[in-house]
Image (cartoon, rainbow, N blue to C red):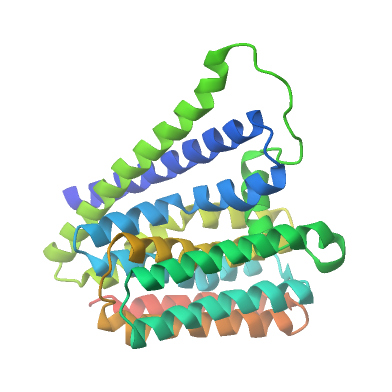
Amino acid sequence: MQSFLAVGGGLFLLIIGGELLVRGAVKTAEHLGVSPLLIGLTLVGFGTSAPEMAISIQAVASGSPGIAIGNFVGSSTSNILLILGLSAMISPVDVASRAISRDGSMVLMTAMAFALVSFALPYDRTVGAAFMIWLISYLIYAWRQERVAEIEGHTAAYQKAEAYKELFELNFRQRVYHRVRHRAVQVMPVMIAVLGLVVIVLGGKLLVDGATQIARDYHVSEAVIGLTIVAIGTSMPEFVTSMVAAFRGHGAVAIGNILGSNIYNILAVGGATALVQPTIVPDRIIWIDNMVMVAASIALVLFAKSGSRISRPEGALLLTGYIVYIASMWPR
């Protein structure tokens, strides 16, 4: 019971810390006159992925690669099958053909790249650097693409920030140029961001320790714990933001949030994990869970291209696939 409380407490701290980090970083950037678009593409994108990154980095550093890699692989899978499936069941998700061709293909390519790398190459710093360079290149592309968004449609990186804005009512479209008179007001957002980072680190430590103990107590592999309890827990922000977008009928934001999160999961979280500590990808993830992630990505692209929307029956099929997947891995 104590280990489950540790996991729950860790998840709570991760969510609170992530919110503090993003809010503090965004306010600091606004005071410095940073472009709202750049804030959305970078600070919000990285900030909302900070819990996953903290978990994976701490897990791999403590010798638990199953939790580290299972976290972002399982999160990518649950984003599509669980969260997008539920979103589509609430309200059919309309998809712009250009967006799915561009960002859906990106999600599929990153999933396939990770699966191939896991199978054929050492998961080392070279791979981590390549993923981070890929992410930076994508963000530069997204920055340029947003200048013609009226024609081409918004990128997934932008929609990920929009989903967060809808939930917390952050106004990224207004730039802040006014001078702050009191130094304390200038310093406060920085302190909030630092506090958020500290809380994330503490929450990550608590969750990794609790998840590791659950694996030992119940004789379950760390990979399964990472793919289920940890992955679902760290996907809660994406779950909430996508549900809010779905209830408001903003299907493009909901699917953009999922696509953007999956891109960050593999390239940012996966890349940072390999950079910090080269490791070995567990066999179970190589042969089973990577394949499920790739299959889910393929299903997403196919469903989105059929009629330019993900219907309620298709959402139910995605959700059913996730239930079967979880049921098949958890010991009876």
* Residue 173 horizontal side relative to residue 254, left or right: right
* Residue 322 horizontal side relative to residue 93, left or right: left
Task: Give the farthest residue toward the right.
Answer: 151
* Residue 155 horizontal side relative to residue 134, left or right: right
**Residue depicted at x 23% and y 77%:** 331
Q: Position of residue 281 (x, y in %)?
A: 29, 77
**Residue depicted at x 65% and y 69%:** 88
Q: Nearer the viewer, residue 24 or 246?
A: 24
* Whether residue 47 is situated above or below residue 142 in the rendered picture: above
Whether residue 49 is visible:
yes
Whether residue 321 is visible:
no
Q: Position of residue 194 (x, y in %)?
A: 42, 33
Q: Nearer the viewer, residue 138 or 70?
A: 138
**Residue depicted at x 39% and y 82%:** 117
Q: Position of residue 83 (x, y in %)?
A: 54, 65
**Residue depicted at x 59% and y 37%:** 26
The C terminus: image quadrant: bottom left
Question: Residue 230 occupies which quadrant of the picture?
Answer: bottom left
* Whether residue 177 is situated above or below residue 234 in the rendered picture: above
* Residue 294 horizontal side relative to residue 286, left or right: right
Q: Position of residue 246 (x, y in %)?
A: 67, 59
Q: Nearer the viewer, residue 128 or 264?
A: 128
Q: Nearer the viewer, residue 134 or 6?
A: 134
